[in-house]
Image (spheres, rainbow, N blue to C red):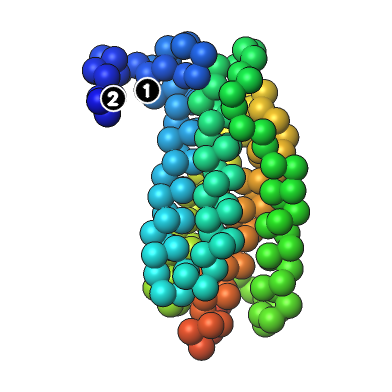
Amino acid sequence: MKIYTKKGDLGETSLFGGTRLPKHHLRIEAYGTVDELNSWLGMLASTQEGLAYLPQIQSIQNHLFVLGSHLAAAPGKEHPHLPAWPATAVLELETWIDRMDEGLNPLKTFILPGGASSASQAHVARCVCRRAERLCTALNEQEGLAPELLAFLNRLSDYLFTLARQFNADAGREDVPWHP
């Protein structure tokens, strides 16, 4: 099978189920941004610091593929081959957040994104996650999405924020407070 089909040459793409949409459609933007987030997580996992969190990051990447497949499915149609959304995905993130947070200094102010290189990458991933969440909430207003997908993206940005702080702590670097 060839990687290219030439069917998108005029600016349209197909959803699972055959519905064709312009490539700039909100649904396509949403799952494209989830894919971008997944790629940022792949980059983060390739760092020395990220290797210590590889099982968590790969679990998240798998969840993002499931989320993306749900976004890429034509709404209102049955899709028996779509993977089911894992019921424990949000709880898994909360467990990891709580575990990391126990060892971190309590926050008393906003912090600037940055610090160790891996922390900076986690902050970039967090921003992409927030964009994916904004696109999905807009799509939800138009077409309706499963609430657990939105909850996952919301919690994932919290996880990535906490992971960035953890990377800084692991590197012996302090979070830099924001001074307006």
Q: Which residue lies furthest to the front in this view?
A: 1
Q: Nearer the viewer, residue 91 or 5?
A: 5
Asked if residue 44 shows in the view, the reply is yes
Amino acid type, mark 2: Met
Residue 77 at what x, y percent from top left?
A: 62, 12
Residue at 54%, 59% in the rendered image: 57
Residue 115 at what x, y percent from top left?
A: 45, 77
87 left or right, relative to 162: right
The secondary structure type at the circle numbered 1 is loop
As measured in the structure, the alpha-carbon distance from the residue carrying label 1 to the one carrying label 2 is 23 Å
Amino acid type, mark 1: Lys
Asked if residue 108 shows in the view, the reply is no
Question: Mark 2, residues whose alpha carbon is within 10 Å: few (<14), some, or many (≥20)?
Answer: few
Quadrant hosting residue 117? bottom left
162 left or right, relative to 20: right
Residue at 41%, 74% in the rendered image: 48
Circle nearer the N terminus (1, 2): 2
The secondary structure type at the circle numbered 2 is loop
Question: Mark 1, residues whose alpha carbon is within 10 Å: few (<14), some, or many (≥20)?
Answer: some
**Quadrant into which the N terminus falls:** top left
**Quadrant into which the C terminus falls:** bottom right
Quadrant hosting residue 73? top right
Residue wearing tag 1: 23
140 left or right, relative to 132: right
Residue at 46%, 74% in the rendered image: 49
Image mark for residue 1: 2
Quadrant hosting residue 95? bottom right
Residue at 39%, 24% in the rendered image: 24
